Structures are given as C-alpha cells and as structure tokens.
Amino acid sequence: MTADVETLRTVAAYQFGQGAGEALFPHDEERTITRTSSGRPRQVRVESGRVATYGTDGRFRLGIEGGRRLHDALPDGAYRVAVGDESEPFVRDGRNAFAKFVSTADDGIRPRDEVLVVHTDGRLLAVGRAELPGEAMLAFETGMAVKVRESASAPE
C-alpha cells in the first residue's frame, strides 16, 4: 500500500507540480484506495470525500476534496480559472464555466488539464477539465472553458 501511495504522490507532482503529491496524499492520513479488476489504483477517498480518481491515461481526475487540497497547496493562480459574480451561482450548482465569464486563467493551462474554478476573490467553486488553453479562455467570447466535474456545494 505504501508503494501505491508513493506512486500516486509522484504522479500528482508530475501533473500539478512540486508539493502536489504531499498535498493530495499526506503521510499521516488514513485513506481508502479502490482498485480495478487488474489491481491498479482507481479512486482515492478520505473521510471528507473523494480526493481523486486515477484514470487509465495515468492522470488524476480531481474530486472537490482534492481541489480543496490543491487550492491550499499550489501557488496563487496555478491551475486556476477565475469567474466573477455573474457565473458563480451556476458553477456552484455544478454547471460548466464558459469563456465569456472567465476573468483570469493560468497561461499554462492546456485542454484536458484538471483545473480549479475559483471566484475572483479566491474561493474554490469547483473542479473540472479545461476545454480550452488558458489564453483562449480569456480571448474567446463564446464556448465552454471548463467542464465542471464537481462543485463545492453540489453533493458528490
């Protein structure tokens, strides 16, 4: 089990940057790791919810608990897409974030990256998959910027 956690930490650090592995999977925490029929790690859960799902492509799909942890651990702006008051209620309700309402986005975001959707004041609203590069989220007036997977107020 320890080897699995070390591998998951390494993948998280590769996907999200230094410190992400320890933020998502701290040493002093009890967690449940579900497995596929082949024995590969699948979902990582803690008492407060799903941290992440480990996909067949070797990348994590964040749960809102994982989003909270990365929100606290990553540098400001990293893997974040910010929306304002107009879009907040919809994103909190689990709806997608559209480019028209994006006020800031990390330039390093690429399509299919896992991102944190935050309010312009910094509060975490949701986690999801980027549909556009960060620069395009700011430049486009139409189109989906982030496919929201789970919001901070929606049940898991």
Image (spheres, rainbow, N blue to C red):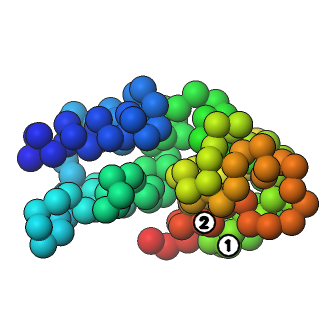
Q: Is residue 86 visible?
A: no
Amino acid type, label 2 = Val
Mark 1 neighbour density, 10 Å: few (under 14) some (14–19) many (20 or more): some
Mark 2 neighbour density, 10 Å: few (under 14) some (14–19) many (20 or more): many
Amino acid type, label 1 = Arg
Q: Residue 43: give x, y in percent of width and height.
A: 28, 62
Q: Evaluate if marks 2 and 1 touch, with contact meaning CB atoms under 8 Å apart.
A: yes
Relative to 72, 20 lies left or right: left
What kind of element bears circle 1? loop
Q: Residue 87: give x, y in percent of width and height.
A: 80, 63
Q: Which of marks 2 and 1 is nearer the N terminus?
A: 1
18 lies above or below 121:
above
Q: In which quarter of the image is the C terminus?
A: bottom left
Q: How far apart are marks 2 and 1 (CA)?
A: 6 Å
Residue 41 badge: none
Q: Residue at 34% across / 35% down in the picture?
A: 21
Seen from the viewer's position, the closer of residues 147 and 116 is: 147
Q: Residue at 55% across / 51% down in the picture?
A: 113
Q: Mark 1 points at which residue?
A: 95
Q: Residue at 40% across / 28% down in the picture?
A: 19
Relative to 114, 133 lies left or right: right
Q: Quadrant of residue 92?
A: bottom right
Q: Is residue 103 visible?
A: yes
10 lies above or below 83:
above
Q: Residue at 56% across / 56% down in the picture?
A: 112
Q: Mark 2 points at which residue?
A: 148
Q: In which quarter of the image is residue 52?
A: bottom left
What kind of element bears circle 2? strand
133 lies above or below 36:
above
Q: Residue 105: give x, y in percent of width and height.
A: 73, 43
